[in-house]
Amino acid sequence: MFYLRSWMTTSSPDLAFATQDKALKAARQVMDQLGGSDHKPVLLRVEKNTTSTLPRWNYKKANWDHFTELMNELAVPINARSNRGARAITEAIIKSAEKAIPRGARKNYRPYWTEELEELENEVKTILPKGVYGAMYAEDMTIWATEEHTGSLVHLQMVLDALRMWRGKWLMKINAEKVTFATFTLSTKFQTVRLKKREHPLREEPFPTYLRVTFDKRLTRKAQSDKCQERGILRI
């Protein structure tokens, strides 16, 4: 409550509160008076929490030979007193670094990701035929395809054969015990799917799990549900 001594009256001021972390990002603006009212609206603005990642020097990809050449060229003429000489050397280092050391900052940076892993992942993606999709997290990989008939899933076998060749090229070992498959369907009929690794048939997993998530083999698909509904309406 605010007490105005000159008019011997009281009024209720407009108050706005903010926590300490938000108060520094809040701005207040008193607007013009509205109509015949004696109140002025107060506009409050709160900035969004936008964090911009500053570019950093990528020393792992630096061309140190080129950096040394530039430093030798720029540092030779430096012949001045201590302060000027220090500034000149600093400028020479920065100019050489800008030309020989890449800079940048990736939003989703993965410190373990290398050019070899990037090439490896791209090569895996290229062997996936149309209609077959894949996902890879660390050493765990999954491939899947959606078809109306299980006989069309021959594409998955093609991918398995290609992965075997790819494994040999990259000298990697695939744990045969962990290579399993699962069939997701709404059909009540028994589905016969045969996939194999070399001459050994793959084991069908009754409770498929990926990244600690267990999937329901009766997982519904909206497209399948709509198709069943259309067929049901035609039969009525």
Image (cartoon, rainbow, N blue to C red):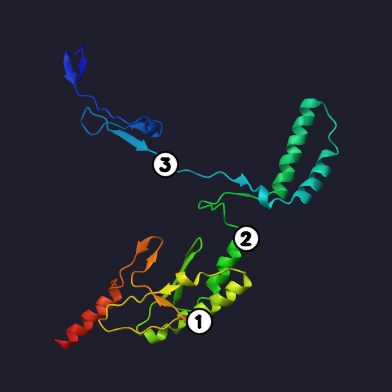
Q: Distance between the residues labelled 1 and 2?
A: 27 Å
Q: Residue at the spot x=19%, y=21% of the render? A: 11
Q: Provide residue 206's location: percent of width, then percent of height.
A: 33, 72
Q: Residue at the spot x=77%, y=34% of the render? A: 88
Tell me the quarter of the picture where residue 201 sits: bottom left
Do labels 1 and 2 touch, CB within 8 Å?
Answer: no
Q: Residues within 10 Å of mark 3 (few under 14, many from 20)?
A: few
Q: Residue at the spot x=72%, y=49% of the render? A: 99
For marks 1 and 2, the one nearer the N-term is 2
Residue position marked by numbered label 3 in the rendering? 49
Total number of numbered discs in the rendering: 3
Q: Provide residue 93's location: percent of width, then percent of height.
A: 74, 40
Q: In this view, does 177 lie to the left or right of 64?
A: left
From the viewer's side, name the closer residue of 17 and 45: 17
- Residue that lies at the very extreme toward the left in this rendered image: 236
Amino acid under disc 3? Asn
Residue position marked by numbered label 2 in the rendering? 115
Please tell me whether residue 120 is drawn above or below residue 70 in the rendered image.
below
Residue position marked by numbered label 1 in the rendering? 158
Q: Residue at the spot x=37%, y=73% of the render? A: 205
For marks 2 and 3, the one nearer the N-term is 3
Amino acid under disc 2? Glu
Q: Which quarter of the image is occupied by the N terminus?
A: top left
Q: Which quarter of the image is occupied by the C terminus?
A: bottom left
Tell me the quarter of the picture where residue 189 sits: bottom left
Q: Provide residue 25's location: percent of width, then percent of height.
A: 40, 34
- Residue mark closest to the camera, 3 vs 1: 1
